[in-house]
């Protein structure tokens, strides 16, 4: 009976975000090989870079997830659809195939890449596209229809197009990171300073309690007290966008909220205010600025923030790292970055009139 009660206690703690399966494993792991449909990913590669996937045909997925900027946009807060501004940092799509949850507030299941793509394409403050219009645009490009027919015999349709783009996103994976070589047995892959940082990561700093597994993320939500980005309230378009997000999420009393409440807007549980998804530690060299609101420009700032125990209401205890320990930890974090993953924008085929009776 005692053993059964212990299991229940651990499960409850895990669901509450206090303990995760990754935290109990308490270590990093090499990235596995991604699994995706190659034929769909080939079409998805074109669609990912195609501005015609947005309402005004001016934005593509790559606008906010630029391969040359770590598959992000390099800004603290994203721009959003024209005439709006977004209120969170654009996360990298690198290694999305292995994520447990999507979005900074964790509102989407990581196993459903198609829904993630749909939300980004159809949301008014991101790409503002209607699914019916999108499928008609795709059908008017013969090269896209030909690629579609490599895996389906019907006409392109909106809901399946999202999954096709998702298959391409699954193919975007970190490449040749020193940490992977080290974890597979190559002791020379990390230098002495990085190995010292790894011991701190697992020991005194205890980063591994939340940053574990292949991504360096437990897939859970935590409160670290990151300071608010003042632009969210100082810039009206961003404030309007966050209030719209709260309204469409059904959050109570949202007009009196002037901060980013994170997961609370989704769960409606006051205990979740200020909780955000644990980000991946992969390819940090290329994905600055950091945190859900881009408040830290460098890894040194991030490590210093955690060393102090985070900000107001943080779940983290002060680490009291010395300057040399901070430098070692930063050096180790950089070892989770591989070679840049660059996919060039393909030459996009033009619209062509469909034959009479084929529309």
Image (cartoon, rainbow, N blue to C red):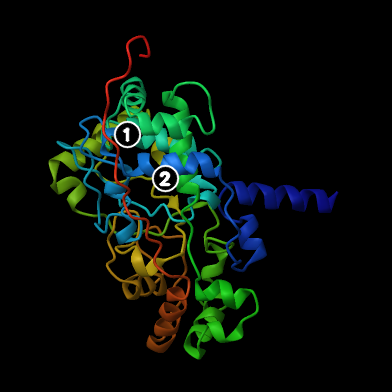
Can you give x and y, in whole percent of width and height, for residue 325 in the image? 44, 85
Q: Is 215 situated left or right of 299 in this image?
A: right
Q: Residue at coordinates 65% horizontally, 56% vertically from top-left?
A: 21
Front one among 8 and 212: 212
Front one among 258 and 82: 82
Q: Label 2 neighbourhood size at 10 Å, few (<14), some (14-19), many (20+)? A: some
Q: Label 1 neighbourhood size at 10 Å, few (<14), some (14-19), many (20+)? A: many
Element type at mark 2: loop
Can you give x and y, in whole percent of width and height, for residue 277 in the image? 45, 51
For marks 2 and 1 on the same chain, the one whose residue lies earlier in the sequence: 2
Find the distance from the CA under tag 2 to the CA under tag 1.
Answer: 15 Å
Front one among 193 and 232: 193
Can you give x and y, in whole percent of width and height, for residue 356 in the image? 32, 11
Q: Residue at coordinates 52% horizontally, 49% vertically from top-left?
A: 97
Task: State which quarter of the image contains the C terminus.
Answer: top left
Depicted 137 relative to depicted 295: above or below = above
| Residue located beneath label 1 in the image | 246
Front one among 138 and 78: 138
Q: Residue at coordinates 35% horizontally, 72% vertically from top-left?
A: 299
Q: Residue at coordinates 57% horizontally, 48% vertically from top-left?
A: 16
Q: Is 93 situated left or right of 246 in this image?
A: right
Residue 33 falls in image quadrant: bottom right
Element type at mark 1: helix
| Residue located beneath label 2 in the image | 103
Callout 2–callout 1 Cβ contact below 8 Å: no
User: Can see residue 267?
Assistant: no
- Mark 2 or mark 1, which is nearer to you? 2
- What label sits on residue 286 in the rendered view? none
């Amino acid at each position: 009976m005692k053993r059964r009660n212990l299991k229940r206690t651990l499960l409850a703690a895990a669901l509450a975000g206090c303990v995760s399966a990754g935290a109990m494993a308490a270590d990093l792991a090499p990235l596995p090989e991604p699994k995706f449909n190659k034929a769909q990913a080939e079409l998805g590669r074109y669609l990912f870079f195609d501005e015609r996937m947005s309402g005004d045909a001016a934005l593509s997925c790559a606008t906010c997830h630029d391969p040359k900027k770590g598959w992000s946009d390099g800004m603290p807060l994203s721009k959003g659809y024209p005439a709006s501004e977004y209120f969170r940092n654009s996360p990298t799509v690198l290694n999305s195939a292995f994520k447990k949850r999507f979005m900074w507030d964790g509102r989407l299941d990581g196993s459903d890449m198609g829904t993630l793509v749909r939300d980004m394409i159809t949301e008014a403050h991101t790409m503002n596209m209607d699914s019916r219009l999108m499928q008609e645009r795709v059908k008017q490009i013969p090269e896209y229809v030909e690629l579609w027919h490599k895996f389906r015999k019907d006409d392109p349709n909106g809901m399946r197009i999202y999954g096709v783009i998702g298959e391409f996103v699954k193919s975007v994976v970190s490449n040749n990171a020193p940490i992977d070589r080290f974890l597979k047995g190559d002791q020379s892959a990390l230098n002495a300073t990085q190995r010292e940082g790894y011991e701190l990561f697992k020991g005194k700093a205890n980063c591994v309690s939340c940053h574990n597994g292949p991504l360096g993320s437990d897939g859970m939500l935590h409160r670290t007290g990151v300071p608010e980005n003042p632009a969210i309230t100082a810039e009206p378009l961003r404030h309007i966008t966050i209030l719209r997000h709260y309204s469409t999420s059904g959050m109570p009393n949202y007009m009196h909220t002037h901060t980013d409440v994170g997961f609370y807007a989704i769960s409606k549980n006051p205990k979740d205010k200020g909780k955000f998804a644990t980000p991946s530690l992969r390819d940090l060299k290329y994905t600055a600025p950091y945190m859900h609101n881009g408040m830290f420009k460098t890894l040194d700032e991030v490590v210093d923030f955690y060393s102090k125990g985070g900000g107001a209401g943080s779940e983290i205890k002060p680490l009291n790292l010395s300057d040399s320990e901070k430098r070692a930890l930063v050096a180790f974090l950089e070892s989770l970055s591989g070679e840049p993953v660059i996919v060039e924008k393909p030459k996009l085929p033009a619209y062509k009139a469909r034959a009479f009776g084929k529309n």
